[in-house]
Amino acid sequence: MEDGVSELKHFTDESQVEADGASSIEQGVAPILDTEVMCIDHHVTEDNTRDDAALLQAEIEPLSNVEESKDEAEEALSLIHQGNHVQQLDTSYTPLDISNTPIMIAHATADFIGQKSNNFLKGCKWAPDGSCILTCSDDNLLRIFNLPASLYSNASQRCDEELQSVRWIKEGETVYDYCWYPLMTSFDAATCCVAATGRDGPVHLWNVFTGDLCCTYTPHNHLDELISANSLGFTRDGSHLLCGFPKCIRVFPTASPGKQCRMIPTVVDKCKFGQSGIISCFAFHPSDEDIFAAGSYTGSVGIYSLSTGTLQFLVEGHSGGITHLVFSADGNYLYSGGRKDPNIICWDIRNPGKALIRMRRNVETNQRMYFDLDSANQYLVSGNHSGKVSMWDTRQSNDEAVLNTSLSFQAHKDCVNGISIHPVLPVIATASGQRKFPLSSLNHSSSSDEDSDCYENDSVQDNCLKLWSLASQQYSIDLTEENCT
């Protein structure tokens, strides 16, 4: 498909409102979980459930009113920060150094070995405060791993530490998408929340400190039947949760779980014009809270106004469905990548139209292939189907349409589907694995072979999380310590 852009006028007068016609867009920043409603889903496992009577009596206080005592705060923090000290990173960003070969400083493999023969990962995402990292895998578990203690002393030291999850959360069915609450900080347990959506279920909001289900957001269709969201995304201020569906976006107030939401149609029925297909991913403008981008499995990227629900313009240029979007730090550029599509395309949203530049990667799978842009707005990092990680310097001068790779290294033996750059440290997290379908056995001479699974390229199966240091040799992380004894 050729690069192009469609300029749109307001194709909808007003966004449709569900559930008693209440609007979900409110002024100001709504505190997360500012409600006394607890919506409990029946897919929660026994380990993560509490007594029903206790759930009905539980109340969630607004963040503005949460004033935990010192003892209560220390008890909550101990769930993730183990030991006698809580170490807080310096919030000043340390740039990546690509002059040296990246060093693997930690990995997690044992957590993903279990009953499933191929428990591949589905990406990884650092917490907004950088204190821990979230993963999802094919066993429908969301796992939390702490930032390794070794990073508090020297990020360039080769230690190859084995990570173990400190918390896991079980979803009932296949997980489609998941994301952190953007204002999360591990020093306020009430903000440590993760949203997840899966097959045949509502959107769950989990507290990663306790593993408890905080509430649910339940989208319904015109027949009042529960439908599952295909993608999720919190607005920058955390006040709203956007969910992607075929030809529409539903906007839930974070503070009001349940059915109440506002629907933004992405296609006008009368003229069949707009962004068709399943809305597969979101990205939010870093400075303008009214602007967000939505990708579709048809290969298009739309820029929307959150307040009016109108599509501002549409760009097309991918050969596969969009699976990930990232805004640059200044908000002028938008990067998009798709499945079974070798291109990551950079769009200049100030002058939408032809693709500004492309970055080549190897993608041979239909699963989500994440990429990330560092906080300095310089290096874009992506995984490849071959197990390599590629890095591009977006500031380098290049007259060609394709940007040359600045660094490439072999990170895994299998597809690298997850990439996440730490918000302040020169550390990159990678997640690997892919779905492998059993091959039919042609000549089985023994009955024992009938019970064994045969997988294509089974010998290169690699399902794990790895952390890589791109720090300079002299680098040492500055930190402050707070006693929690």
Image (cartoon, rainbow, N blue to C red):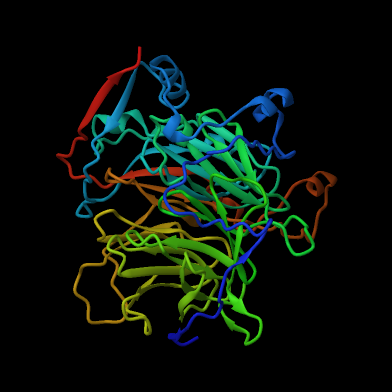
Where 393 sits versus 29, above or below? below
Residue 356 at x, y = what percent?
32, 79
Quadrant location of the C terminus in the rendered image = top left
Residue 246 at x, y = what percent?
65, 69
Where 13 sits versus 485, above or below? below
Residue lying furthest left in this view? 474
314 lies left or right of 204? left
Residue 284 at x, y = what percent?
41, 60
What residue appears at the point 47 percent right and 83 percent down from the top-left corner?
Answer: 9
Residue nearest the observer in this picture, 132 or 283: 283
Where 25 sits versus 33, above or below? below
Can residue 464 be seen by looking at this rendering? yes
206 lies left or right of 42? left
Residue lying furthest right in this view? 447
Residue nearest the observer in this picture, 320 or 160: 320
What residue appears at the point 22 percent right and 35 percent down from the top-left corner?
Answer: 477
Residue nearest the observer in this picture, 18 or 432: 18
Where 7 sits versus 263, above or below? below
252 lies left or right of 132? right
Residue 158 at x, y = what percent?
29, 36
What residue appears at the point 57 percent right and 41 percent down from the top-left corner?
Answer: 142
Question: Within the image, what quadrant is residue 320 found in?
Answer: bottom right
Q: Count all numbered tags in the image, as a single digit.
A: 0
Can residue 358 be seen by looking at this rendering? no
